Image (cartoon, rainbow, N blue to C red):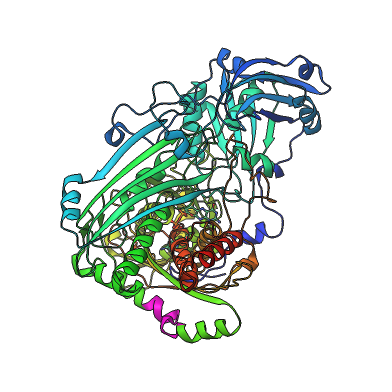
Amino acid sequence: MARTRIGDRVKRTEDRRLVSGRGRYVDDIAMTGVARLVAVRSPVAHADIRSIDITAAAAAPGVLAVLTGADYGADGLGDLPCISLSDDYAGPDWCRTPFPALAADRVRCVGDAVAVVVAETLDHARDAAECVEVDYDPLPAVVSIAAAMDPGAPQLWPGTERNLCFEAEFGDADKTAAAFAAAAHVTEIDLTNGRVAANSMEPRGCIGSYDAGEGRYTLTTSTQNPHWVRNILAQSVFAVPDNRIHVKAGDVGGGFGMKGMPYPEDILVLWAARRIGRAVKWIGERGESLLSDFPGRDHVCAGRLALDADGGILGLEVTTTLNLGCRLSPEGAIPAIVFGRMATGVYDVPAAHVRMRGVFTNTQSTTPYRGAGRPEAIYLIERFLDKAAREIGRDAISIRRRNFIRPAQMPYATALVDTYDIGEFEAIMDKTLELGDWDGFEGRRADSAARGLLRGRGMSSYIEVASIFNDRMEIRFDPSGNATVLAGTFSHGQGHETAFPQMVSDWLGLPIEDVAFLQGDTDRVSHGGGTFGSRSITVGGSALRQAADEIIEKGRRIAAHLLETEAEDIDFDDGLYTVRGANRSLTLAEAAAAAYAPMGLPVELGVGLEAVGYFAADRPNFPNGCHVVEVEIDPETGGVRIDRFVAVDDVGTVVNPLLADGQIHGGIAQGVGQALTERVVYDDDGQLLSGSFMDYTMPRADDLPSFHTAFRPVPTKSNPLGVKGAGETGSVGAPPALVQAIADALAPLGVEEIEMPATPSRIWQAIRDARRTS
Ligand code: MCN
């Protein structure tokens, strides 16, 4: 094929493999003699474990081992650590919860693993797991945030009050109080951002083995972050040097934040493998995933917005309470903290005060899910703007126009934590309104009405924060003159196998198929930060640029030697080194081949051609955009049809519009799911009611319209490529726009607010309630 450039719509090269069934997901790995592990999970939400009788299970056919929490403790294995809370903002008194891979004395949610059975086959393991007898002494459970914070509620952990794990705050309480004292109007909101399940296409799964000769563990797992998995397992769980654990991740079929960190099962397969001397495999089934994957969202938010007489925002005061589930997962606190950073959105809010709290309940532990606090924060501020506009007699557009941060105010320090470097929010809104034909709405509304349908429109202006931490990327040439990118980031659906070689092809002038891609193997890639927080194209891409520059310079020195001139006299362009003013030249591939020749180059030039680049996201970037949605609602059924969905995004320089578009489509689909259909539901005793796809409603293709997307890039200067993240934007902008469109459609009937998910039954009920009251 060809040389590719940044900005080209290059088709995903990995798809040749993936759509022809040649992907290598965990369950595709064929191994002889691999034993199967099945977890015995608690059927009750809160109980002391009186005893576990494994006698019958251990004697069952094919069983190799039955292990319990007592064995776990006896073998000295450690806990999964929480790495998402810091004394800096949570103070020293936050509640640290032990997180062993098997509960020993007490279970705290339905699905807590209390034992594992390892057997010759999956059927043997399943049958034997039925024979493990656990005697539970039930305790009262708390499921909702409200119930957990009730003063008389049972506490999940000793030393807590109202089940509060931590409390933190951003902003200035006094300044905000003064803003409210001066307000002409105050809008109040109380809303819920429900719990959702990631439901990756590939469920979690892992295979562990242990080489007793080398004293070395190997874990193949479906993760977003192989190096962190290795480091945490080595340092916190197995107490061995990092180099005693080899983590491999092949193709990973989605994660959305949920696969960001190690899970109990990663520990269990390695531990069981060590105990039985054979490889051990665990694959989650869909129902088990719904029970044991860490879900996302689950905030309750309440707050006030202070406005002056002209609709200008004076202050924002919010408390968000995050349901952490029964113990702190490694990244559990992140959504609350990110919420606190982003709560003022794209608006010029002079004073703000946000309190973030994390509360324990007898439900599965939560974790970041696509957006991780950003969708929750933007949902709140956008619902504020819409409600305030209604209350003071303005419309959705004019109140936003009045309050946007203007380009001239950049860099803009928010009243909370961040400084936005750049952004043109009003111009993006105008482009979106134009593409969505906002002004033509009334005609379409009349058409819908003639068909007995209610039409509504909604919009949202969103901003999010992307990119975090440092990373390294390596480019290694081989003697044939081809290059391999060794990535510290980890693609699990985003298309890095295309994007990074596309960039290298541009910079080094190589055909894209001459650039291979390697990731996800801790023995072959020396270090990496993995993929989350829409960081890869920023942090990984910038590091890769540095590596490419170094390759060019090393190649230049080799070319100078071979062309018998000085490096300063050599130009590099389009993969070719040319002596300035002469017609002597050498390709980069030829320079690479020379670098590997057994003799010929002075050793000061090294042996081989490779380079490592580094980048640290000391400053994040702030992707932003606008979504416009129109819906039609059938008042007889409450059914919603999305008629149009327009999204205009500023993700800075667009590396590959096809990939970025795909990311935005996927994010919108997840936002639509949250807004319309998806919700994890527990009953008051902590039983999971949404335990299968019969009850947990994923959006389907026919719930979604054909999205109209466009880019309006405002490149950032916070990285050398001008890129901003694109991986999470869709999920941030979609819910508020959609919910507002539904509220707008229902407004003529007297319905003002509708909670997510706006299911047909909820809408139908709201219409009936409104008709009854009117
Ligand atoms: N891109 C681009 N130009 C930009 C920004 C991004 O062309 N200015 C393209 C890149 O080519 C890259 C992709 O978009 O391949 C995403 O890049 P980036 O925004 O850097 O995000 P990451 O690769 O770091 O992905 C993380 C992000 C997150 S946080 C979640 S959650 C998420 C997501 O990506 N989970 C996903 N997208 C997902 N997509 C799939 N299929 N599966 C998941 O689990």
Decide if residue 580 is in sight here.
no
Q: Is residue 378 above or below residue 629?
A: above
Q: Main secondary structure of the magenta part?
A: helix
Q: Is residue 424 above or below residue 318?
A: below
Q: Quadrant of residue 651?
A: bottom left
Range covered by the magenta-colored residues: 431-441
Decide if residue 251 is in sight here.
yes
Q: Is residue 228 left or right of residue 400?
A: right
Provide residue 79's location: percent of width, then percent of height: 49, 24
Q: Is 263 contained in the magenta span?
A: no
Provide residue 84's location: percent of width, then percent of height: 39, 37
Q: Quadrant of residue 289?
A: top right
Q: Is 609 or 537 nearer to us in this picture?
A: 537
Provide residue 642's location: percent of width, then percent of height: 56, 71
Q: Is residue 497 left or right of residue 372?
A: right
Q: Is 244 or 586 nearer to us in this picture?
A: 244
Q: Is 438 contained in the magenta span?
A: yes
Q: Quadrant of the N terminus?
A: bottom right
Q: Is 178 or 233 nearer to us in this picture?
A: 178
- Which residue is at 52% across, 85% downward? 446
Q: Is residue 195 above or below residue 123?
A: below
Provide residue 366's location: percent of width, then percent of height: 50, 40
- Which residue is at 28% across, 37% downward? 89
